[in-house]
Image (spheres, helix red, strand yellow):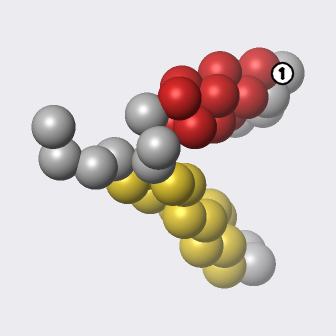
């Protein structure tokens, strides 16, 4: 499925605001996994 990419941009900014991280793992022919890591409150 294709999108405009704005969703990931919004997620990235929100994660930054909460001092978190985004990990990306990509496997050609299989896909990409994004993991959002946020500090405990």
Mark 1 nearby-residue class (10 Å; few <14, some 14–19, many ≥20): few
Picture quadrant of residue 14: top right
Residue 15's spot in the image, x, y percent? Answer: 51, 36
> Where 13 falls versus 30 (above or below)?
above
Q: Residue furthest bottom?
A: 27
The percent position of residue 33, horizontal first and vertical second, equals: 53, 61
* Residue 3 in sight in this render: no
At x 65%, y 21%, the residue is 10
37 left or right, relative to 31: left
User: Quarter of the image containing the C terminus?
Assistant: top left
SS of the residue at dot 1?
A: loop
In the image, residue 14 sits, relative to residue 38, either above or below, namely above
Residue beneath the point at 54% across and 55% down: 22
Instruction: Tell me which corner region of the image, top left, top right, bottom left or bottom right, holds residue 8.
Output: top right
Q: Could you tell me which residue is drawn at 66 percent across and 79 percent down? A: 27
Q: Left or right of 33: which side holds 13?
A: right
x and y, in percent, of residue 35 in the image: 44, 57
With 38 as the anchor, is 14 left or right in this view? right
Give the percent coordinates (x, y) of residue 5: 79, 28
Q: Quadrant of the N terminus?
A: top right
The correct choice, above or below, for 11 with respect to 22 in the image is above
Q: State the residue lying farthest toward the left.
A: 41
Res 26 visible: yes
Identify residue for label 1.
4
Instruction: Identify the residue at horizontal 59%, vertical 73% (top origin).
Output: 25
* Pick the front one: 11 or 40: 40
| Front in this rendered view, residue 17 or 26 | 17
């Amino acid at each position: 499925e294709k999108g405009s990419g704005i969703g990931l941009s919004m997620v990235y900014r929100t994660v930054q605001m909460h001092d978190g991280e985004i990990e990306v793992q990509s496997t050609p022919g299989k896909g990409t996994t994004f993991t959002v890591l946020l500090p405990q409150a």
